[in-house]
Amino acid sequence: MLDLSVNIGAMRLKNPIMPASGTFSEDCAKLFDIDALGAHVTKTITRDIRGGNPTPRVCEVRGSMLNSIGIPSKGVDYFKTNVIPFYDQYQTPLVVSISAGSADEFAQICEEVSVPGVAAIEVNISCPNIEADGKAFAMRPSTTEAVMRKLRAATDLPLWAKLTPNTGETTEVAQAAESAGADALVVANTMLSMAIDIHTRKPKLGNLMGGLSGPALKPIALRMVYQCAKAVSIPVIGCGGIATVEDVVEYLIAGASAVQVGTATFISPTVMVRLISELEAFLRTEGLSSVSELIGSIRDEEASDGVFFAEAAE
Amino acid sequence: MTDMTLNPIFETICRVKSNEPINREYRLIVLDAPSHILKCEPGQFFHLLCPTKGDLRPYLRRPMSIYGFYPEAGELHFLYKIAGEGTAALSALEAGENLNVVGPLGHGFDIQDDWQKLMVVARGVGLATLAPLAQKAQQMGRKLTAICSARSPEVLMSIDHFKALGAEVITVTDSEGTSGVEALEQLIEAHIQAEGVDAFYTCGSNRLLTMLQTICARHGIPGQIALEQQMACGVGMCQCCVRSFRRKDKIIHERVCKEGPVFNLQEAMGC
């Protein structure tokens, strides 16, 4: 009997495959059995009702995409009345992604969504902090620690901190989140990018810049997962460019305890269910009995100089 | 279990039966499709995973409105023009190859009970979107008049298709000087006076939208428009494909893929 289950702190997930925030919604239930997933992760919500960014909000680059959606949100009340009851029909744990422009507002929404039906809260600290010139909380260890402390005080639910690749202090930010009480890290969000139409000379996104996601991001997020898994003792959830079972396995070996699949769902909306069965097949082929045998199994004993060099160069 | 209570969506691999040019600009791709994905409404679309072909490597899916769906024959038809990397790759598909499609998606056109006399106004590939409406109108025994606009008579499309579906067809072209807003407005006004119109249907162009909004407001005639926007997911999760609408004195955003692609003509705003 193959064991696909993984532990994220005190939470036990039946398998390590879950959606990345913003690439999953109730609509997915029209396409496949969403109870097959390890967890349900909602699109980020904010306290206030937000319209989002100007269009175009998306463009493609070679083999990947850029987006600048701007977190449109119908607010907390809509979420509690409509979204939580929908996911209550399912056994799979619900992870609510939240965001805010200041640490206090963040703590407030965190408290407001700490209600029955919610299993964990993913805190999108990769979004701009209006108290720090719009720099994302997770760009710096100090702002990460400050916001995570307030979030920790606001809820008893597991807190997953979603980190940004737009930092030169990956391990320090990860450690700051851990010491302030995060129960897990989600590594990572999209990377700030740009694309320009050479004929009109206009940026391809209405908001000028946006987040890169898809296979092009994978090596960067994978490197971050590796660094974070080495630096902290809480679980790391890998996220960035996962499209195939080989990608899933690579993240697990790097140290991820679970993975989030995002952009690949846009290319194939049923990809996550396929990845679950392919992961099972991979374990069988490799003669393994559980996913936990893969987690952090990287053979990097002789690479310590390389790691040191890379971190110094960061 | 999959929530099949309302409008299931399928990701399906279909075999290409044919993929040929139908005139100088447009091509028709015919897919061999299982009947369960062909429970479509006119105006709905599919999200196509255009293939990788040589240097052509489209990444995101491309939304494409349904030109025809035939459950008995097991066929799904799309009419398209090569406009970029996705459609260029699509045009390279040969009979016997596979195409991955997601759909049917979105909300299509309505024909309300008291809408007996329908008028379609469309240009270019927009006619493809409106062709299934003509078929439904015929099935429901409604009278449909289609004003088909194009650059020149050679690239006028789907005229025979609309005629075969019982529609009265009026063609207008740039090269003959009959497709300008003024000429069109006169033509439509004359038609309203002579025969009456209960509802208008259009898609795409800002120019047609503005003109029809004026005409419809003047006569109190309802209308519907199919809109486009860049999409990523196509099913409602990513919020990429929003457009602005005027509703109850407020400007609101709705998703073209989920709330649309067909919207109330008077609420739609150009972009």
Image (cartoon, coloured by chain):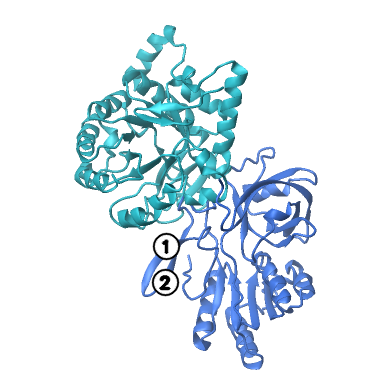
Chain colours: A cyan, B blue
- State left or right for residue A13 relative to residue B52: left
Which of the 4 image quadrants contains residue B68?
bottom right
Local secondary structure at mark 1: strand
What residue is drawn where x is 31% and y is 21%?
A232
Local secondary structure at mark 2: strand
Residue positioned most to the bottom: B194
Q: Are marks 1 and 2 on the same chain?
A: yes
| Along the viewing direction, whichever of A44 and A4 lies nearer the viewer | A4
Residue positioned most to the top: A302
Residue B11: x %, y % from top left:
63, 47
Residue type at mark 1?
His
Q: How many marks?
A: 2
Picture layout, residue A266 above or below residue B256: above
Which of the 4 image quadrants contains residue A312?
top left
Mark 1 in CB contact with mark 2 (< 8 angstroms): no
What residue is drawn where x is 47% and y is 11%?
A299
| Along the viewing direction, whichever of A79 and B46 lies nearer the viewer | A79
| Along the viewing direction, whichever of A58 and B222 lies nearer the viewer | B222
What residue would you read off at disc 1? B253
Q: Chain of mark 1?
A: B
Picture layout, residue B20 above or below residue A225: below
Residue type at mark 2?
Arg
The answer to whether residue A73 shows anywhere in this view is: no
What residue would you read off at disc 2? B246
What residue is drawn where x is 43% and y is 18%?
A296
Picture layout, residue A100 above or below residue A239: below
Which labelled disc corresponds to residue A52?
Answer: none
Judge the density around disc 2: few (<14), some (14-19), many (≥20) Cα neighbours within 10 Å: some
